[in-house]
Image (spheres, rainbow, N blue to C red):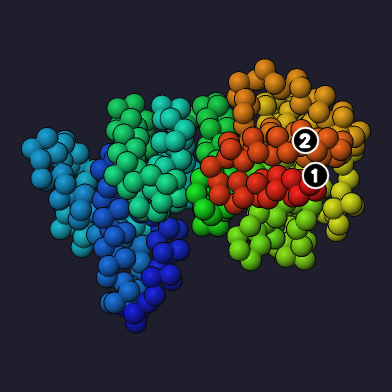
Amino acid sequence: MSGPLAKTHIEPLLRELAPQVLGVLARRYRDFAAAEDAVQEALLAACRQWPHAGMPENPRAWLIRVAVRRMTDMIRGESARRRREMEMAPEIEPASAAANAIEIVIEADMDPEDTLILLFMCCHPALSRSSAIALTLRAVGGLSTAEIANAFLVTEATMAQRISRAKQNIKASGIPFRLPAPRERETQLPSVLRVLYLIFNEGYANSNGAAMQRPDLAGEAIRLTRQARALMPDHAEVTGLLALMLLTHARRHARAGASGELIPLDQQDRGLWDRAEIAEGLDLLPRALSQGTPGLYQIQAAIAAVHDEADRPQDTDWPQILALYELLQSVAPGPMVSLNHAVAVAMVHGPARGLERLRSLEGDERLAHHYRLEAVRAHLYEKLGDTAAALRHFRAAAAHTSNLPERNYLLAQAARLTTAEN
């Protein structure tokens, strides 16, 4: 053991090791739910012991050893589990043997595809979107139930129930611990990428509460997407998603003022943008775009790149952005894509044309009273000089957002127009 360590030094390592340890147990014991519980206990034990006793020489081996002991204790604790242990005897060593020979087992059981297998399991179609996000953050991201509950503003008990149901659904569905067949993999990969994208979005633009962004969640999404790309380096959309995250995340330091207030893109201090992340994203983008027909994440990454390459807001190539949104509408049509397309139309052809585009979205129930639709309307009416309409829509937008910095920004715009009118 090394000397005592701060918890802040331990947590990133535990997040990195969590899927590796879970992969070993899930493959050996063929019980994802029980294996995940055992790994969580091992992680908690590390959080309790390592800050005082120091880091073990082989942290992964330590975690696997503790998790194996927890696993075998669970197996022996119930008669049904004891029968299963007997049936699996050729595959599973007794607890004492596993503990004594674990260093030999570790390298034999480590598989570079474990993280990808876990991603596919946690994002399986049998799970709801919210369950998939929660389980991915816990099983693959190594976050505790309390951390996930805090991120989504629910109680720890509620999140524990959500994760438990997700694990039971995996168990009931009989999903094997292996990569899906190539055809299934291509079918399921969009769900995996979607979950990673949703985790990133929740971190980058917090949907609830007083904080505008959750850097820990956004960073975790980037880390997991890096792992996915390391395992699938030739998949264009995986590369595109990583590029999109980096090019977007690069603006995080400029998005909020000293008091946490929202700063819109056209008012941000671009000197605060992370140039290293922008450079990495720009380097990844042509690799993604060269690998066949551009998809959802590649095109969005290209749009983010156009914004990031502009030294000043007025230098932004809006005609190119408009062309990219038109391509995106043909590849992945949806209400938010149409909303952003309307903004690009307004920037290229004027606010009246943008408002005309917005009218086509009025019957879409998915956008009915959505704060972003109201906010875009407000900005375009202000550009047209219709202060009364702009004021009305700014107030409507503020009423429909649950994020406090966004609400304060929208109310500030309404107050500004009210002052201007008077």
Q: Which residue is mark 1?
A: 421
The amino acid type, in three-letter code, at marker 2 is Ala
The answer to whether one can see residue 88 in this image is yes
Quadrant of the rendered structure where residue 164 is?
top left
In the displayed structure, does residue 82 sit left or right of residue 105?
left
Q: Earlier in the sequence, mark 2 or mark 1?
A: 2
In the displayed structure, does residue 347 sit left or right of residue 275?
right
The x, y position of residue 91, in whole percent, is 24, 43
Q: Is residue 203 above or below residue 322?
A: below
The answer to whether one can see residue 242 in this image is no
In this view of the protein, which residue sits in the foreground, 367 or 422?
Answer: 422
Element type at mark 2:
helix
The x, y position of residue 387, in whole percent, is 80, 38
The x, y position of residue 172, in whole percent, is 30, 27
In this view of the protein, which residue sits in the foreground, 66 or 315?
Answer: 315
Q: Is residue 325 above or below residue 9?
A: above
Q: Tell me whether the residue at label 2 lies in contact with that at label 1, contact meaning CB atoms closer than 8 angstroms.
A: yes
Residue drawn at x 40%, y 61% is: 14
In this view of the protein, which residue sits in the foreground, 389 or 11?
Answer: 389
Quadrant of the rendered structure where residue 334 is?
top right
Residue drawn at x 87%, y 29% is: 352
Q: Residues within 10 Å of mark 1 (few under 14, many from 20)?
A: few
In this view of the protein, which residue sits in the foreground, 333 or 287?
Answer: 333
Residue found at the far front of this picture: 422
Residue 388's tag is: 2
The amino acid type, in three-letter code, at marker 1 is Glu
Element type at mark 1:
helix
**How much space separates mark 2 and mark 1, taking CA atoms?**
9 Å
For the N terminus, give its image quadrant: bottom left
Q: Nearer the viewer, mark 2 or mark 1?
A: 1
Q: Is residue 33 above or below residue 337?
A: below
Total numbered labels placed on residues in the image? 2
